[in-house]
Image: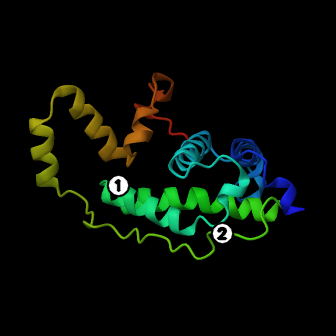
């Protein structure tokens, strides 16, 4: 039962969790995106180092250390959304461990998620502001800003654009629906 997994390394269980996520971790039994998988792995590595997680037994009774680590992230200047993401990564790992019989109960069942209400509300630029930005932007940035404004793509999505995305016949872009 649960006791037989106490000495199993955290790394081994984490590897099983990430393999499950890669193949069927999303809703509908689909795998996580490559970016989500990478982020989840990076965050779990951070948790292993921050909490010195060597075996699965080290995951039990971690509520207070997890809260302190999240507070440390927040005090270090991380945005609430980032802090919440780190909390969700270890929490979802623990829930998965319970469902698979690796842990008897979720040690983070009482973990309260961070409020991700933006500290500064966002708004669209008006035409005058857009004109002023484009007037002072360097040429290579101006094109980037124009593409962002016309497509609504975010920074990471803009980074993923390549020449294969250009539609030369119609003068536009083919956008990946996964974005």
- What is the x, y in percent for residue 3? 84, 60
- What is the x, y in percent for residue 120? 24, 66
* Colour option used: rainbow
Q: Which mark is residue 44?
A: none
The number of callouts visible is: 2
In the shown orientation, is residue 135 left or right of residue 43? left
Res 15 quadrant in image: top right
Rate crowding at label 2 as few (under 14), some (14 to 19) or many (20 or more) other CA atoms within 10 Å: some
For mark 1, what is the residue? 78
Q: Is residue 70 above or below residue 30?
A: below
* Residue sitting farthest toward the right: 1
Image point (58%, 77%), residue name: 110
- What is the x, y in percent for residue 150? 33, 45
Res 58 quadrant in image: bottom right
In the shown orientation, is residue 113 left or right of residue 41? left
Frontmost residue, 151 versus 41: 41
Image point (65%, 69%), residue name: 107
Circle 2 — which element?
Answer: loop
Circles 2, 1 touching at the beta carbon (< 8 Å):
no
Image point (35%, 58%), residue name: 79
Frontmost residue, 172 versus 116: 116
Res 98 quadrant in image: bottom right
Q: Earlier in the sequence, mark 2 or mark 1?
A: 1
For mark 2, what is the residue? 107
Say if residue 177 shows up in the picture. Answer: no
Frontmost residue, 71 versus 124: 71
Image point (34%, 55%), residue name: 78
Q: Is residue 20 above or below residue 84?
A: above
Give the quadrant of the N terminus. Answer: bottom right
């Amino acid at each position: 039962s649960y006791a037989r997994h106490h000495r199993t390394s955290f790394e081994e269980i984490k590897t099983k969790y990430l393999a499950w996520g890669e193949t069927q971790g999303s809703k509908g039994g689909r795998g996580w995106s490559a970016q989500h998988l990478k982020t989840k792995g990076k965050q779990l590595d951070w948790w292993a180092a921050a909490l010195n997680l060597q075996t699965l037994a080290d995951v039990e009774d971690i509520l207070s250390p997890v809260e302190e680590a999240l507070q440390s992230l927040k005090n270090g200047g991380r945005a609430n959304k980032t802090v919440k993401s780190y909390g969700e990564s270890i929490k979802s790992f623990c829930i998965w461990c319970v469902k698979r019989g690796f842990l008897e109960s979720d040690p983070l069942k009482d973990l309260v998620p961070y409020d991700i209400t933006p500290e500064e509300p966002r708004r669209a630029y008006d035409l005058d502001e857009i004109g002023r930005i484009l007037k002072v932007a360097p040429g290579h940035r101006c094109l980037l800003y124009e593409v962002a404004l016309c497509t609504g793509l975010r920074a990471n999505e803009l980074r993923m654009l390549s020449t294969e995305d250009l539609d030369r016949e119609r003068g536009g872009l083919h956008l990946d629906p996964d974005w």
